[in-house]
Amino acid sequence: MDTRPRPPTSIRVPIAWKFFALLALIIPSLLAVSWVGGRGMVGMKERLDTVYDDNLMSTQAIGSLSVALEEAEEMSLRLVDEVDRASIVGLDSELRQEVFPEVALRLNEVRVLSGPDSSEDGVVARSLEAGWGEFVAFANSRAFLAATRGPSDDDRTVSSTLERLSTSLRILTQQLEAQETRQAQVAMVEAHAPMPIASGCSGRSWRSGCWPGWARRCG
């Protein structure tokens, strides 16, 4: 009988089995990465859609307000220059019953879309409200009403005041438009950089100063 010690027996695993075992480890990881990437793309698209929709609504509201303000200025100046009594009555009625309510409506739309009073847009919207209030107050003033009854020595002064008030309103609407453009550009950049949602963020995001992923702006 051979009493010499035998070498330990090793189990030879076929190379194919090793390959399949490796695939079993890699495939779930690849699927997980693909799933996370897909979720990230969906989230980015949703953010971009929100930015686009919000900016479109705001731009349309500001544009409509600008048109209404220009019409108010133009008709008010026409009232001062008009000499025909029948035309004055018609213009004054249209100004107060149609144009002024239209401006108020468009201004309210902008105010709602501008977000909180403390936000960048909210501050400008409040200034627009105050400026429009000053315009309406002047349109109801004794000086303006006297100028609309026919030619007077104060016509030039009244027209200058109307132009000054309208210019202030125009500057504010242009400022709001510029802010909309800048905010949309920043939001587009942020949307391409996935970040965890900060606690306390909800609702419509970037206009209220809290956009998903903007940790620096979310309290």
Image (cartoon, rainbow, N blue to C red):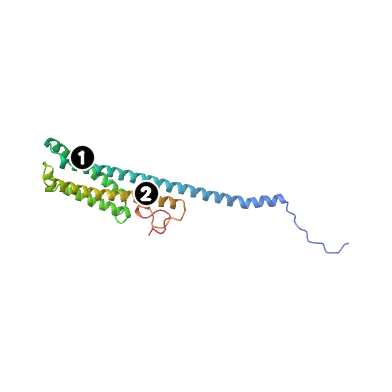
Disc marking residue 45: none
Near mark 2 (Cα within 10 A), the count class, few <14, some 14-19 or many ≥20, is: few
Quarter of the image that includes the N terminus: bottom right
Question: Residue 5 appears at what percent x and percent y?
Answer: 83, 64
Residue 120, located in which quarter of the rendered image?
bottom left
Under circle 2, the secondary element is helix
198 sits to left or right of 100: right
Disc marking residue 181: 2
Q: Looking at the picture, does residue 83 appear above or below residue 1?
A: above
109 sits to left or right of 214: left
Question: Residue 144 appears at what percent x and percent y?
Answer: 14, 46
Q: Are marks 1 and 2 in contact (CB under 8 Å)?
A: no
Q: Residue at x 36, y 46 (%)?
A: 55
Q: Nearer the viewer, mark 1 or mark 2?
A: 2
38 sits to left or right of 25: left
For the residue pair 50 and 158, the one nearer the viewer reads as: 158
| CA distance separating discs 1 and 2 | 30 Å
User: Which residue corresponds to mark 1?
Assistant: 98
Q: Residue at x 18, y 40 (%)?
A: 78
Quarter of the image that includes the C terminus: bottom left
For the residue pair 77 and 137, the one nearer the viewer reads as: 77
* Number of marks drawn: 2
Q: Residue furthest right?
A: 1
Q: Residue at x 69, y 52 (%)?
A: 18
Q: Residue furthest top?
A: 86
Under circle 1, the secondary element is helix
Mark 1 / mark 2, whichever is N-terminal? 1
61 sits to left or right of 80: right
Mark 1 is on which residue type?
A: Glu
